[in-house]
Structures are given as C-alpha cells and as structure tokens.
Image (spheres, grey):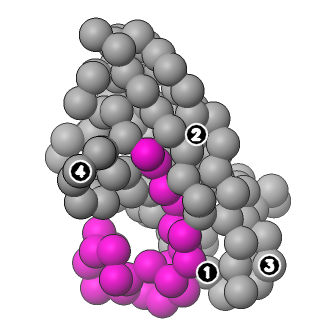
Amino acid sequence: QVQLVESGGGLVQAGGSLRLSCAASGRTFSSYAMGWFRQAPGKERLFVARITWSDGNTYYADSVKGRFTISRDNAKNTVYLQMNSLKPEDTAVYYCAADLNKSKYGSRRYEYDYWGQGTQVTVSS
C-alpha cells in the first residue's frame, strides 16, 4: 500500500504561482514513478506531469510545458509541482498518483495504482 497526501492548493490570480506537494508513505520503495493529474468540474481527469524516482526523468502535458515543473525529494518521499504563469483554465482539483510499474505511456490514468485525495487550485482572472 502507498498513501499519498497532496497539499499546497489555493486561490491565486492569473499569472501567479503555486507549489503543490505530494507526500508518499507506506511501500514507497515499490513505486517507479509519480504523476500529477487534474480534473476540472464536469471534465475528465487529465495528465499533467510525471517523474521517475530513480533518475528524475520528467514528462509533461503540452498544456503545461514551460510553465509547470515537477520535481522530487527522494529523502522525503515527496513530489512537487511548481506551477507558474497560472491561467484560469488551470483551475481544477489536482491529484498525485503512484505508478508501481514501468508503464508504457506514463500519461494514462489506468497506469497509476494509487491516488491522493486531491487539492483544489483556483485561478481567478
């Protein structure tokens, strides 16, 4: 079992920044990679970013590339999502997730085995 707890969400004006954190506990050594997804009201949950624990290899959705940065602190079992130049369309509940296997795509929901409870990010215009 892997437990994930997100934090850092809130209300910010367009153009502002937020940093989300995801603290992992439990069998964290069994996790290959971590991802961030987001879900806006009435819409499906979409991939945002991914990072592997071992070498820090990253992968981003086109919609956030150049504005968001995913990073990890292996000693703290924590993954971060630094979000800059935020836009109203970034408003969503943000979820972190753990992938226990070396998944083929890394951006599909079904590839992730554990999920956090989510944290709300609201960007006002």
Crowding at dot 3, Cα within 10 Å, few <14 / some 14-19 / many 20+, comes out as few
Q: Is residue 16 left or right of residue 72?
A: left
Label 4 and label 3: CA atoms lie apart by: 32 Å
Find the magenta span and give its range.
Answer: 93-115
101 within the magenta span = yes
Residue 47: quadrant of the picture = bottom left
Which of the two labelled residues, at mark 1 and mark 4, occupies the earlier sequence position? 1
In the picture, the disc for residue 31 is 1
The secondary structure type at the circle numbered 4 is: loop
Identify which residue, 54 or 21, lies in the foreground.
21
**Mark with earlier residue (4, 2):** 2
User: Which corner quadrant of the image does residue 76 belong to?
Assistant: bottom right
Quadrant containing the N terminus in the rendered view: bottom right
Q: Is residue 30 above or below residue 90?
A: below
Q: Is residue 23 magenta?
A: no
Residue under numbered circle 4: 42
Asked if residue 112 is positioned above or below residue 73 in the image, the reply reads: below
Give the CA distance from mark 2 to mark 1. Answer: 19 Å
In the picture, measured across the screen, residue 68 lies left or right of residue 52, that is left
Q: Position of residue 61 (x, y in %)?
A: 24, 51
In the image, which disc is placed on residue 80? Answer: none
Q: What residue is disc 2 on?
A: 20
For mark 3, what is the residue? 26
Which one is earlier in the sequence, the residue at label 3 or at label 1? 3
In the rendered image, the quadrant that contains the C terminus is top left
User: Residue, x 27% and y 23% (percent of image)?
Assistant: 88
